[in-house]
Amino acid sequence: MRFEPTVWIPILKRVYPEIQKETPVALYGSQIIYAVAGVAFESKDIDLLIPQPVSPTIFIESYRRAFDENEARLEVISREIGHAVYHIFTSRGVAIEVFALPRGYSPFTRFPDELLYVERDGVKYWSFTLEAYAVMEASRSDAPRVEGVRRFAEISQLVNWEKVEKLACHANVEGAKIRKFMELVNEAKNRGAYTST
């Protein structure tokens, strides 16, 4: 199930500042596009990124403070040391996923110079640049994803694609993979094969 921006943005605006009080946190996934470009898409969840695993109680308490609710449900998936995914189930239906990725894969270590502190709709967020997010999207194990191509086709004029190629090279992303993603984005843009939400 996907949620309209009118559903997930108010949740993000309330929970992000509360989590930020407890641990460094950056936007991840399409929430990057919302914060940096002001374009919001339907989303199945809210994606956030932290530099390292933390106590799960941080997320429970942050959620409780944000929504003044006593009950909160959290699932933690840990695949290896230094890697965890915290899945917060909200009473509003939209899940919040907080990722702590292994150091070698984390955007915090892959793109340290691509972090921005941006304000969107009255809330300040740490976010990666659109260019760093393009590399993240293109280098996913399941890339190219139709939704990723569609989203970047809609905002392609806001992305410095030369910088994307340089960041990909610096992050050791296979050149063919990034070129294929850029080619698909360009084709989708030229066809108008995306819909704005």
Image (tube, rainbow, N blue to C red):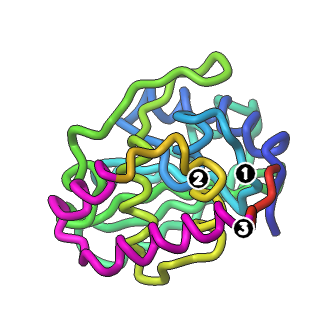
State the SS at label 2. loop
Q: Earlier in the sequence, mark 2 or mark 1?
A: 2
Q: Which mark is residue 41?
A: 1
Tell me which segment is drawn in magenta. Answer: 162-191
122 left or right of 159 in image: right
Above or below, 152 against 38 in this view is below
Q: CA distance from mark 1 to mark 3?
A: 19 Å
Q: Amino acid at mark 1?
A: Phe
State the SS at label 1. loop
Choose top left, top right, bottom left or bottom right for residue 148: bottom right
Q: CA distance from mark 2 to mark 1?
A: 7 Å
Residue at the disc numbered 2: 30
Label 2: how many residues lie within 10 Å, few (<14), some (14-19) or many (20+)?
A: many
Q: Residue furthest top?
A: 122
Residue 158 in the image: x percent, y percent?
52, 40
- All told, the count of numbered labels is 3
Q: Main secondary structure of the magenta part?
A: helix
Above or below, 174 against 2 in this view is below
Residue at the disc numbered 3: 191
State the SS at label 3. helix
Q: Amino acid at mark 3?
A: Arg
Q: Nearer the viewer, residue 9 or 154?
A: 154
48 left or right of 174 in image: right
